Image (cartoon, grey):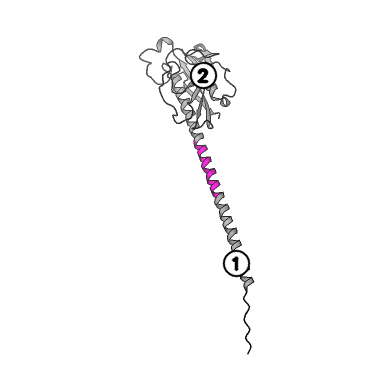
Amino acid sequence: MTVHAAASPTGSSCSQTGMVLLLCLIFLMALTLLGLTASADAILQNKLASNLKDSERAKQSALLALTWAENWLLEFEGAPPESCLTRCDGIYVHVNGGLSPRPESENYSWWIEQGHEAGIDPLTGERTATISSDSAYAPFWVIESVQNIPPSENGTPELQTWYRILARGSGQTDAAVSVVESIIARSWPDVGDTGSADTAGQDPCPGAEPSSVCGRFAWRELR
């Protein structure tokens, strides 16, 4: 009886091994691409969250500066500050139409030149509050006298003045900037009455008649 030895499938085994190796490489490449994509997405999301947080910090800084400026003006006792075409002594109140048409686009130097730092009394130069200490730049505010209504027209014994106040705040970097504005009205009592004990230390608009207008009437975010 003749015995024939079976042929070894050497070529087929090598072909299958090569195919498995190729599939493993493709699978590893796909995993690597997925990992890189997920990593890039995580970095992008983190950057977006950081930018959003910084933008919110800038907005809060601007709102705090706006509120501080409003309260300072409403609680101010004395004769109403005069409007100026150029910087005057003490508070710089711009005349109607004297500001830039787009103050939200102006640089920080413009705000320093045209306005006042929030938290510092513009008349005495004393700091009364610290606004947004974690911001890259100190918040500033600018004031414009929009309209004066004399007693003969408003029906009260007091002068009524409408103001436009703008405030600028920044985040931890100057890349995040917010600018807000408000319209407020202030009734000014007779100068001779503002120093009396009855008006000192009262709520905003000291000495204002009950029929007088006083406070914030509108606000909006410019940037």
Q: Locate residue 101, reporting x and y percent.
A: 60, 22
Q: Does the magenta portion include 33?
A: no
Q: Is residue 190 left or right of residue 30?
A: left
Using the image as rendered, state which of residue 71 and residue 49 is in the foreground. Answer: 49
In the picture, which quadrant includes the C terminus? top right
Q: Nearer the viewer, residue 164 or 65?
A: 65
Q: Quadrant of the N terminus?
A: bottom right
Q: Residue furthest top?
A: 192
**Disc 1 residue type (three-letter):** Thr
**How far from the left and from the top, in percent, is residue 169?**
50, 28
Query: Gap between marks 1 and 2, in whole Å?
Result: 86 Å
Q: In the rendered view, would you say 68 is above or below 34?
A: above
Quarter of the image for residue 132 reads top left
User: What residue span does the magenta drawing correspond to?
Assistant: 37-53
In the picture, measured across the screen, residue 199 lies left or right of residue 167, that is left
Q: Would you say residue 41 sits in the magenta stretch?
A: yes
The circle drawn on residue 17 is 1
| Residue type, label 2 | Trp
The structure residue drawn at horizontal position 46% and vertical position 17%, both measured from the top left corner, is 187
Q: Position of residue 154 (x, y in %)?
A: 50, 15
Q: For the stretch drawn in magenta, what is the main secondary structure? A: helix
Badge 2 marks a residue whose secondary structure is strand
Q: Which residue is mark 2?
A: 162
